Amino acid sequence: MLKKSKVAAVFAAIALAVSSAPASNAATDKQLEIFTWWASGGEAAGLAGMTTEFERLNPNTPFINASVAGAAGVNAKGVLVSRMQAGNPPDTFQAHAGEELSSYVKAGQVEDVSFLYKSEGWDKVFPKDLIKTLTTNGKIYSVPVNIHRSNVLWWSPAAAKKAGITKAPASLYAMIADMKKFKKAGIDGIALAGKGDWAIAHLLDYVLLASMGPDKFNGLWKGTTKWDGPEVAKAIKYFSTILSYGNSSKSLDWPDAGKLVTTGKAGFFIMGDWASSQWQSEGLKLGKDYTWAPGPGTAGVYQWLSDSFTLPKGAVNRDAGIAWLKVCGSKAGQDAFNPKKGSISARTDSDPKLYDSYLQAAMKSWKVDRLVGSTVHGVNWGNAGMAAYNSAVGRFYTGGAKDSKGFVKALLAAQKANAQA
Ligand code: GAL
């Protein structure tokens, strides 16, 4: 038997060990394999913010970063499909809130994670409408880590000054007038990133919204606005004109297109707010080297998307996956991730002081603006529809934006592909 003093010493030692041990949600598995497309720049920096928090809480669970480069998931999604088909899912993967997530739910590839919403109290800290976009038949299938805004206009104050532009354009018409001014000053009107099609489709998503307004835009995905009707025809005209002011290379990756703006070679850039974190990761300063405004014609409308993480069925390290999801949904995890990722927290209780002036403005807008989903980033259509939408836009763009009849046909086919998936 141990003497009393020895017992006390043992208890004291245990108490010390417990108090300095990581929180009780430490994963019990050997490793965590997490699958994303955040492979470089601001994207990787954001992910690193959150994985550091995971490692702090789970020091004995090595983190394996299985990211597949290619923005917007253009390469990652294909790799993910083959891994799932081969019965080899990662322990967690990135999926957008909305119809993209529903694609995985329909295919029976992800687990219901409602139990985490109960145990972590997330029902109370995530906006109800956001939770709805993660829910099928009363079950919640993922954990949102952020809210990005896609309808943002970025530009360089120095280049604008050179072209005689003093304020952000407030309509598509004014934007085109400014692009003419840029052109006169020897600067391309807009930076275009043709690599992987998605960034040009992202631009179309914004032009459709700005040209027809949120109600008609929403109707495109609900089937009440016709793809072969006058509203889309008008938007395609704007789109073709805007494309005609772009840089000549048709295959730039989005960070390279972004560089055209910050080095004064191109005027405007329509891109999600991850552009800001990319530029900050390159050492540039918000407000000095680049600035922003709501996409012309869409002030008061927040075109949103949300990255979320799932628990794949059959994950080898399921406990580690759950530990990761707990970090994803936590205040500490979100506030470590989002200021670096260039997005706002999906939680309603994050600390604005940790975020830069753009993100603080976004936090305010997210609360009061009209919310409209992004198509290219998963809200409006599932994976099949999105892929068809992106490649329809890509073909139109590389074909010189001339065949608008063929374009409408391809968009109608994308709508069909989405419905049939
Ligand atoms: C989006 C994603 C963002 C960002 C962007 C560019 O689909 O939601 O977080 O990664 O692609 O890669």
Image (cartoon, rainbow, N blue to C red):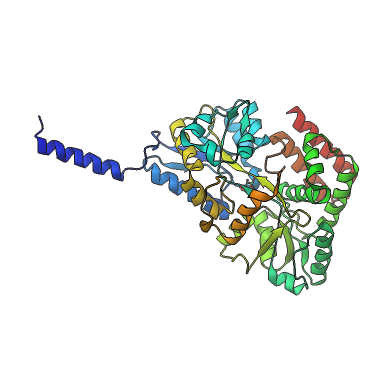
The image shows residue 92 at horizontal and vertical percentages of 52, 36
State the residue in front, 152 or 395: 152
Compared to residue 164, the image places residue 174 above or below, namely: above
Q: Residue at image x 75%, y 64%?
A: 168
Q: Which quadrant, please, contains the C terminus?
A: top right
Left or right, residue 171 beside residue 337: right
Q: Which quadrant, please, contains the N terminus?
A: top left
Q: Residue at image x 53%, y 32%?
A: 311
Left or right, residue 374 beside residue 84: right
Compared to residue 86, the image places residue 269 above or below, namely: below
State the residue in front, 338 or 159: 338
The image shows residue 97 at horizontal and vertical percentages of 63, 38
Task: Let me know if residue 65 appears in the view.
Answer: no
Q: Residue at image x 59%, y 61%?
A: 357
Query: Residue 242 is drawn in which quadrant?
Result: bottom right
The image shows residue 151 at horizontal and vertical percentages of 71, 52
The image shows residue 417 at horizontal and vertical percentages of 77, 32
Task: Let me know if residue 408 appears in the view.
Answer: yes
